[in-house]
């Protein structure tokens, strides 16, 4: 079992930056693949970035590639999402999620463990 708690959301102007954190419980955090999803009002939840166990590989959605960076600190049981050059249309609730498989997946159903989400609002 993994429990996840996100933090770091808030209000930022267009072009600004935020760093989200996701703190996980459990002694086997390093073996989990972690994903960052977001869900805007009226839209489906989508995978933004993912990082596999031990940070061996990463995935980025095309829309954020080059602006967002996912990383993990297994000693702190924490995964991060650095978001730069934010756009107004990226206003959403951002969630971190975990799965025990050693590779990422894009579907929501592939991740059994979820945090409560953190709101990111980008003002234009």
Image: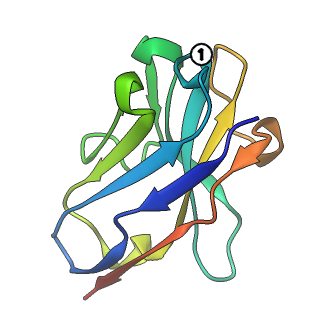
Q: Position of residue 49 (x, y in %)?
A: 47, 40
Q: Residue at x 63, y 44 (%)?
A: 97
In this rendered view, identify the residue nearer to me: 14 or 20.
20
Q: Residue at x 36, y 49 (%)?
A: 64
Seen in the image, is 50 located left or right of residue 69?
Answer: right
Camera-side residue of 27 and 100: 27
Q: Residue 109: horizontal and vertical position, in percent?
A: 83, 44
Give the residue drawn at x 52%, y 19%.
30
Q: Going by the picture, which residue comes out furthest to the bottom?
A: 124
Q: Is residue 121 above or below residue 99?
A: below
In which image quadrant can residue 117 be found?
Answer: bottom right
Answer left or right for 115 relative to 51.
right
Q: Position of residue 103 (x, y in %)?
A: 64, 17
Answer with the quarter of the image where residue 25 lies: top right
Question: Which residue position is annotated with label 1?
Answer: 31
* Helix, strand or loop status at disc 1: helix
Badge 1: few (under 14), some or many (20 or more) residues near its Cα, within 10 Å?
some
């Amino acid at each position: 079992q993994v429990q996840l708690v996100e933090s770091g959301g808030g209000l930022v102007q267009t072009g600004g930056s935020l760093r989200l954190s996701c703190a996980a419980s459990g002694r086997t955090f390093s073996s989990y693949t972690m994903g960052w999803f977001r869900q805007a009002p009226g839209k489906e939840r989508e995978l933004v970035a993912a990082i596999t166990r031990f940070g061996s590989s990463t995935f980025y959605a095309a829309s954020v590639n080059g602006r967002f960076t996912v990383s993990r600190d297994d000693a702190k049981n924490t995964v991060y999402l650095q978001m730069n050059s934010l756009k107004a249309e990226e206003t959403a609730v951002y969630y971190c999620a975990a799965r025990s498989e050693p590779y990422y997946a894009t579907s929501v159903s592939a991740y059994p463990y979820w945090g409560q989400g953190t709101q990111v609002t980008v003002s234009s």
